[in-house]
Image (tube, grey):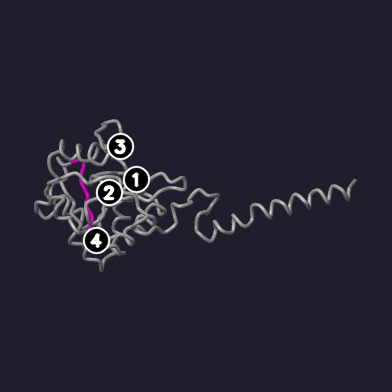
Amino acid sequence: MKNKSYILIGFVILVFGIIFIPEIVNRIKTGTVVDGDRHSVGMKKANAEDLLTMGKVPSFKFIDQHKDTITNEDYKGKVYVVEFFFTTCPSICPIMNANMVKLQNKFKNQEDFAIASFTINPENDTPEVLKEYADRYGVTNPNWHMMTGDMTKIYALSNTGFNLFAGQDESVNGGFEHSGLFALIDRKGNIRSRADEFGNPIVYYDGTTDEGVKMIEQDIEALLKSK
């Protein structure tokens, strides 16, 4: 009976190897299985043509840290990243902007790379305040505009235009709530996104994690290569 059991176990192992091992090896080679498939397509480099188009960036017009009027037309022909933040944010904003500086430095030699940061607390975040904040974080890219303006228009841009939540809440630390996500925009003003392992768009990139920053870095590079 013992010999029969060994034979049966050996047969099961053989069948498993024939059926599953080639698929596992193939998925590892193509980068579609990492850490129990949690990251899957998430960390696989995409070409520009592989990125999904989620819609157009809405028109906007605000004042930046240099007191210049900036519109979406100023970003035409550039690949750029969008975020919503505020300078007195005690939680995720410092992480987001530290990561945004990493992206700035990664693409420092790319004149057609840009960043658009919109404050959700314009009453406090005047151009002067934004300039001091930009200097403190080491903003050097001339195409990185930290913008302020009418609160109603900023919130409409965030909540309706990008569908990225932003709101006031006195009960939370800092008095405001917002998403920690980054939006990726191509040269034609389209919001772009990679797909997850199921083919669904991730839509936005997590600006608070190393994984999210690595993903958007890869996709920025792909879009910059695409003219």
Mark 2 in CB contact with mark 4 (< 8 angstroms): no
Q: Nearer the viewer, mark 4 or mark 3?
A: 4
Residue at disc 4, secondary structure: strand
Residue drawn where x is 19% and y is 37% of the image: 156
| Label 3 crowd (10 A; few <14 / some 14-19 / many >=20) | few
Q: Position of residue 120 (x, y in %)?
A: 21, 41
Type of amino acid under label 3: Asn
Q: Main secondary structure of the magenta part?
A: strand
Type of amino acid under label 1: Val
Q: Position of residue 140 (x, y in %)?
A: 21, 62
| Label 4 crowd (10 A; few <14 / some 14-19 / many >=20) | many
Measure how far apart labels 3 and 1 are at the Cα level.
27 Å
| Label 2 crowd (10 A; few <14 / some 14-19 / many >=20) | many
Measure how far apart labels 3 and 2 are at the Cα level.
31 Å
List the residue tagged with mark 1: 203
Residue drawn where x is 12% and y is 43% of the image: 149
Measure how far apart labels 2 and 1 are at the Cα level.
8 Å
Q: Nearer the viewer, mark 1 or mark 4?
A: 1
Q: Which mark is residue 173?
A: 3
Q: Which mark is residue 191?
A: 2
Type of amino acid under label 2: Ile
